[in-house]
Image: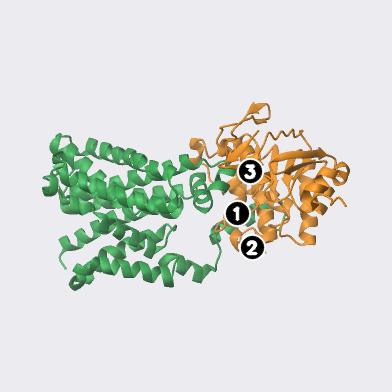
Amino acid sequence: MSLDYFLTVSVFSMINMILALSLNILIGYAGQVSLGHAAFFGIGAYASAILTVKLGMGYWPALLLSVFISGLIGLLLGLPALRVREDFLVLATIGVNFVVVSIFNYVKFFGGPYGILGLPRPSLFGHAFTTREYALYVFLWTLVVVFLVHYLSNTYLKLGFDALREDEDAAESVGVSSPRYKMYAFAIAGLLAGLAGNLWAHYMTVVFPDNFSFPVSIGILTMVVIGGVGTLVGPLIGAIIVTILPEVLRFARDYRMLIYGLIIVFTMFFMPKGIVGSIKGLIFGDTPLGKKRVEKVRRIAGAQGRIAGR
Amino acid sequence: MSKRFGGLQALKDVSLDVEVGEIRAIIGPNGAGKTTLFNIINGFLRPDSGTIVFDGKSIVGVRPSEIAKRGLARTFQIVKVFSSLSVLENVLAGLGVDIYPSLEAFQRSPFAKEYVEKAWKIIETLGIEKYAFVAAGTLPLGLQRKVEVARALAVKPKLLLLDEPVSGLNDLETQEMIDVVKKINQSGVTVLFIEHDMHFTVNIAQRITVLDYGVKIAEGTPEEITKDSRVIEAYLGSEEVA
């Protein structure tokens, strides 16, 4: 196995991790099921391609702008979520995916089926990143995203998402405005998927409409489901599995969608909490709060001169 | 206020004046419009006509989340606890009422000491410490109703709406709920509740409002209401004239 091959698989894994974490915020945290996540991924990639190739912008401003644009479009495409119920949202997001890919395909400005070629690699102090440096660069971004998501998981934002996912009426009754929190979820997911799109596009240096089609969305969904919906580590593990699986099963490449489908069905039937959720359940039992948190709460409640828990 | 769903007049010119500090009951046969009234008060539904004044300000057309922030909390007839969250998190979620709309939501942790302490006090008030770390959805109905009350209390309400707080509860649980609601009221919270259980209602309500087919047919103290002929008629049907 050559180093370049290893680097490429690693870069894809890390970009998929960002995508999976991003989709997990929508599905696992806020309960907004999206089956069109590749659209946001594509918007980030195409935005950066157009800014750098067609408008001649440098990589760094294009990075900022493309991520911002993805967040903004994520917000706009999230608007249907404010109007439609869960099951219709699934359909609406699939529709969004097809519309976005069609625009890439049929609107000349976006390069049509031949895509956009010749994206620059980022450079620092006049030195363009080599493939190895780029892999490191993607690694740093992945770390940033993991820490960001981990940080947000400990805030009232997350609890607001939880409330929204569990019951919209009850969430409203405790002060969580459902439109506001849905918009937050779509904007954050759009930002992160846009970042993934940017990183991917400037690694490949070319973008085609097919890179962001519906099967890609299903791939991202598979990562989240197999790893563990709503967990932090689950989507990371899911991303690695789904990235490496086609490499290991080369002979089965044409049946990728079939395998994704089987994985999702199998996971849903036999371990609906995903790999991470199931393992946690085995070790810590069926408690919704982590062990650390329970202990912390016990300490605080105990400090008040009371005895906590069972 | 009035509310119509298609051809059904759910509420017709119902007027209700709840005084600060009281415990008021709303009773009436099924379909009388009680829950509709609650849904209008807390902002889930908009009245077709009329006004709702809470704490000196009109709250017609205001989002339910904003109404909650102004100090109006509620529970649900069909319990709506956050099932997969622990009881503690359910209460912590209520304590976030002022935080959710501001950017502090991106900074504050629900597991910070101040929130956990407050949540624990509320959990103790309801006597559900034992279940603090259990997923709320796995608890029996009686405990889920308590979790809902705890979550509503965390919103720091001036007015608490309880939609059938003891429906489906056994005698012991009902008695516990009576004690809890009295305790809450004594701490200065106005309580407005819907209930079919007359033992519960007569025990704690200072005044009772009776709805029937969307119309207010009586209002008064428990003694007055239990003797009122229109109320008896609404519940038992009119007396046959021989």
Which SS class for mark 2?
loop
Residue A198 appears left or right of B104: left
Q: CA distance from mark 1 to mark 3?
A: 20 Å
Q: Name the quadrant containing residue B188.
A: top right
Colour of chain B in the rendered structure image: orange
Q: Name the quadrant containing residue A104.
A: top left
Amino acid under disc 1: Val
**Residue A227 locus on image (x, y percent):** 38, 63
Residue holding disc 1: B81
Q: Which quadrant of the rendered structure holds the N terminus of chain B?
A: top right
List the single residue furthest toward the front. Answer: B242
The structure residue drawn at horizontal position 64% and vertical position 52%, both measured from the top left corner, is: A300
Residue A18 appears left or right of B159: left
Mark found first going from the N terminus, 1 or 2: 1
Amino acid under disc 3: Thr
Question: Which one is in front, A299 or B152?
Answer: B152
List the single residue furthest toward the top. Answer: B56
Q: Which mark is residue A229?
A: none
| Chain that the image shows in green | A
Between disc 3 and disc 2, the foreground one is 3
Q: CA distance from mark 1 to mark 2?
A: 10 Å
Tell me, what colour scheme is on the image?
by chain
Q: State if disc 2 and disc 1 touch (CB < 8 Å).
A: yes
Mark found first going from the N terminus, 1 or 3: 3
Residue holding disc 3: B36
Residue holding disc 2: B139
- Is A32 located above or below residue B5 in the figure? below
- Is A62 located above or below residue A7 in the figure? above
* Badge 3: chain ID: B
* Badge 1: chain ID: B
Residue A64 appears left or right of B96: left
